[in-house]
Amino acid sequence: MIRNEQIAFILGPYKAIQTETKADTLCNIALNIQAAKLVSIKYWKMGFAVICPQMNSAMLDDIINDDIWINSYTEIMLRCDVVVMMKDWEIYVETVKLHAEAQIANKIIFYEY
């Protein structure tokens, strides 16, 4: 069992790559939030304390610039012990960049497939 002092950062998509309409965007965001929630629950049950950006910032789009979200979550991720890469992380530019940051920082990285 992992001790609760270890913090896992759930890293996966929030927005879709491309969408046709605002409704499509909101639907894809909701699906990504739900997927992140399920991964988050898995790691809570494993004994980690979990940071899940998708849940933390759910539906707060257009409140601040996306770069501020990304920079802030990069800082939070670097303070965590473990980074959990969600399925299909490789197809999103933001998650690829954050994955590289985690590697540079020698974070423990788990991959969910």
Image (cartoon, rainbow, N blue to C red):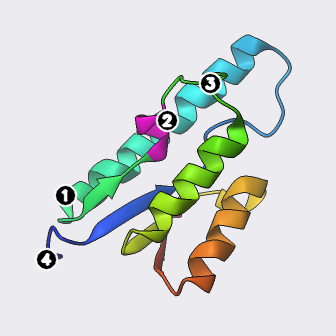
Q: Please give left or right for residue 94 compared with residue 32 in the image.
A: right
Q: Are marks 2 and 3 in contact (CB under 8 Å)?
A: no
Q: In the displayed structure, would residue 67 be above or below residue 111?
A: above
Q: Are marks 2 and 1 in contact (CB under 8 Å)?
A: no
**Residue at the disc numbered 4:** 1
In the image, what residue type sits under mark 2?
Ile
Mark 3 to mark 4 CA distance (whole Å): 36 Å
Sequence-first disc among 4 and 2 = 4
Disc 4 secondary structure class: loop
Residue 51 picture location, percent across and down = 36, 53
Residue at 64 percent across and 49 percent down: it is: 70
**Image disc number at residue 67:** none
Mark 2 to mark 1 CA distance (whole Å): 18 Å
**Image disc number at residue 45:** 1
Disc 1 secondary structure class: helix
Residue at 38 percent across and 41 percent down: it is: 37
Residue 36 picture location, percent across and down = 45, 45
**Residue at the disc numbered 2:** 33
Disc 3 secondary structure class: loop
Q: Are marks 3 and 4 in contact (CB under 8 Å)?
A: no
**Image disc number at residue 61:** 3
Residue interval drawn in magenta:
53-57
Sequence-first disc among 2 and 3 = 2
Q: In the displayed structure, would residue 12 be above or below residue 102?
A: above
- Give the quadrant of the N terminus: bottom left
Q: In the displayed structure, would residue 80 be above or below residue 71?
A: below
In the image, what residue type sits under mark 1?
Lys
32 and 68: which is toward the camera: 68
Q: Is residue 34 magenta?
A: no
Sequence-first disc among 3 and 4 = 4
Sequence-first disc among 1 and 3 = 1
